[in-house]
Amino acid sequence: MAVLFTSCKPDVDITSDYRDVTIVYGLLNPLDKSHYIKIYKGYLTNENALVWAKDLDNISYYDEIDVQLIEHRENGEVVTYPMDTVMSVAKNYGVFASPTQVLYRPVKNLNNHRPVDIRKGCRYQLVITNKKTGRVDSATTTTFDHLAFNIPLGSEQTISTINLNYNDPWDVGCKLINWPDNASAVDAYVTFRYIEQDKVTGDTVHKSVEDMMVTSGFVFGNQTSFKPTQILQKLPDYIPVNNNVWRYPDTYECIDIKLWACDNVYYKYYMVSQPSSSIVQDRIPYTNIHNNQGDERLSLGFFASRTYNLRHFRIDVNSHNEDSLAHGQWTKNLNFRPYTDLLN
């Protein structure tokens, strides 16, 4: 998302001088295989601002900026990685230019473009130098170390059992002894895997509901909660009714719970960026991007860290979970059957 220097109206008469404003969106996670950062520029127009937003050239620096990622290791070693432009990652349709977008990724060097592995527990500095103006925008973040789940999610070496009919809040959090100092908030998501079988041909296909949100957004601290019954309640929002197929849990180990943690920078940005629920629409922008000209109005966005931990779960077949999938009030129209029916 880029920032438009206009009012809420598409057509406005702007009389102020143009000022180069840099907008940054960057989240580092050592568990990610690829790391991309969005760096956009604001624009000024007295024409239709929404039409201008569709033009990639109006919001992209391309090679007008030099971008580096500087890695500060615990032993004092400092390694600088250049960041290369990438235009092969498609962007979803929206207000701003799509599907083509300009992203920046850290590489070993600009000759062979080998990707950089982000290290756990390291401090990273993003440095953006505008080749035309000489202004330098920068921000720092420290990546997370390991996160360990708290009870009742069990240890990493075991597969826990979950009862989808359990209607009491289930605490989900991190063990305090493994809670990173820079972690400020947590959130939990569920993946549900199932099998579809064509009623006529008998052909089967494995499907999944990915990252189904079961909590109400990031919760400050190291623990949040949800009711296991919420998984059953939410499945109809993701799985369409189809009377031509039978559906089965994809084995009894069909559920993953992913616990996310973010640092204070991202948590603050998330909180101030929520839609307004009052008649007051203006809000104070939050940013941790700074520049060498001392004018914070020219540097917006965030450069932050997050990470996750994942656990696999086996549904409790002794607590009527399969009956609830097949005949329960929320999923009875989705044609679920016990997994053993598929094996037979």
Image (cartoon, grey):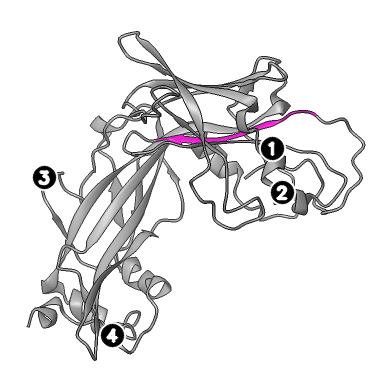
Query: Is residue 269 magenta-colored?
Result: no
Pick whichever of labels 3 and 1 is earlier in the sequence: 3
Is label 2 or label 1 in front? 2
Pick whichever of labels 3 and 2 is earlier in the sequence: 2
Residue highlighted by disc 3: 157
Residue highlighted by disc 4: 245
Three-letter residue code for mark 3: Gln
Residue 295 lies, with reference to residue 180, above or below; the image says above
Pick whichever of labels 1 and 4 is earlier in the sequence: 4
Residue highlighted by disc 1: 284
CA gap between label 3 and label 1 equals 45 Å
CA gap between label 1 and label 4 equals 51 Å
Three-letter residue code for mark 2: Ala
Residue 323 lies, with reference to residue 23, above or below; the image says below
Viewer can see residue 165? no
Pick whichever of labels 4 and 3 is earlier in the sequence: 3
CA gap between label 2 and label 1 equals 23 Å
Residue highlighted by disc 2: 53
- The magenta segment is 19-28
Quarter occupied by residue 260: top left
Front-most of residues 213 and 133:
133
Quarter occupied by residue 317: bottom left
Three-letter residue code for mark 4: Val
Residue shown at 36% from the left, 28% from the top: 116
Q: Secondary structure at mark 2?
A: helix
Query: Is residue 27 magenta-colored?
Result: yes
